[in-house]
Image: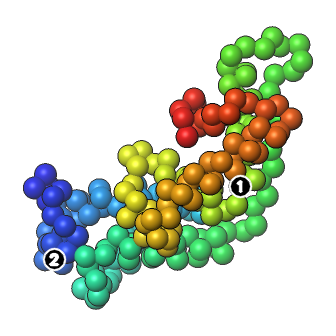
């Protein structure tokens, strides 16, 4: 499979069409993370995301011989994944998510670093959820580990490659502004939950 890691998409799809199992493994390794981040960006829960990813791969199995531009298989997968996510969202019953304070200690508990970190993380995620959906999706996809290439991000989010960096900067600036204007402003550096720099 190591030799196939270096194949371009066109060559890889040709090998998949000839029923090469190693090529399937390489293709799924190459794009499954991207599919997960699309699902998460569209706010699917773990089970719905897994179902949408499985269905996306099934669609490729069904249509592998009719994909018109095999060199753009990443775009095809991203588009199919977005459609499957939308279908999952339509099927899912309306779910109301409310924040609860049950996991916070009472006033008698002493403050410690872990509590402060959880409070900061909670404030960050509240601020994150107040961003425009497009910013939320872009930042979620860019936080992938390993990070997808800008070409993959552009394909997944249907946006020009050249606008990803500037849009990311605007989204992070908006997040910083929300965080600094909140009731408990934090330092000007926006951090990811767990302390990583965004």
Query: How far is disc 2 from disc 1 in space, using C-alphas?
Result: 42 Å
What secondary structure is found at the residue carrying circle 2?
helix
In the drawing, what numbered circle is on residue 14? 2
Residue 196 locus on image (x, y percent): 53, 32
Give the left or right position of residue 143, taking residue 97 as reference: left
33 and 184: which is toward the camera: 184
What secondary structure is found at the residue carrying circle 1?
loop
Q: Residues within 10 Å of mark 1 (few under 14, many from 20)?
A: some
Residue 136 shows in this picture? yes
In the drawing, what numbered circle is on residue 131? 1
154 and 1: which is toward the camera: 154
Q: Quadrant of the C terminus?
A: top right
Name the quadrant containing residue 42: bottom right
Q: First in sequence, mark 2 or 1: give its number.
A: 2
Residue at 26% across, 63% down: 27
User: Considering only vertical position in the picture, is 184 above or below 138?
Assistant: above
Residue 49 shows in this picture? no
């Amino acid at each position: 499979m190591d030799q196939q890691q270096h194949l371009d998409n066109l060559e890889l799809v040709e090998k998949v069409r000839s029923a090469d199992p190693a090529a399937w493994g390489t293709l799924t390794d190459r794009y499954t993370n991207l599919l997960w981040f699309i699902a998460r960006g569209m706010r699917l829960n773990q089970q719905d995301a897994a179902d949408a990813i499985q269905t996306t791969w099934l669609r490729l199995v069904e249509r592998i011989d009719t994909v018109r531009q095999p060199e753009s298989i990443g775009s095809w997968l991203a588009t199919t994944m977005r459609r499957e996510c939308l279908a999952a969202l339509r099927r899912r019953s309306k779910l109301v998510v409310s924040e609860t304070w049950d996991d916070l200690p009472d006033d008698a508990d002493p403050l410690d670093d872990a509590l402060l970190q959880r409070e900061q993380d909670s404030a960050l995620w509240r601020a994150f959820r107040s961003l425009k959906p497009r910013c939320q999706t872009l930042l979620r996809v860019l936080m992938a580990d390993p990070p997808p290439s800008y070409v993959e991000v552009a394909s997944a989010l249907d946006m020009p490659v050249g606008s990803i960096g500037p849009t990311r900067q605007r989204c992070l600036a908006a997040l910083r502004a929300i965080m600094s204007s909140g009731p408990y402003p934090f330092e000007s550096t926006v951090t990811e939950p767990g302390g990583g720099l965004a």
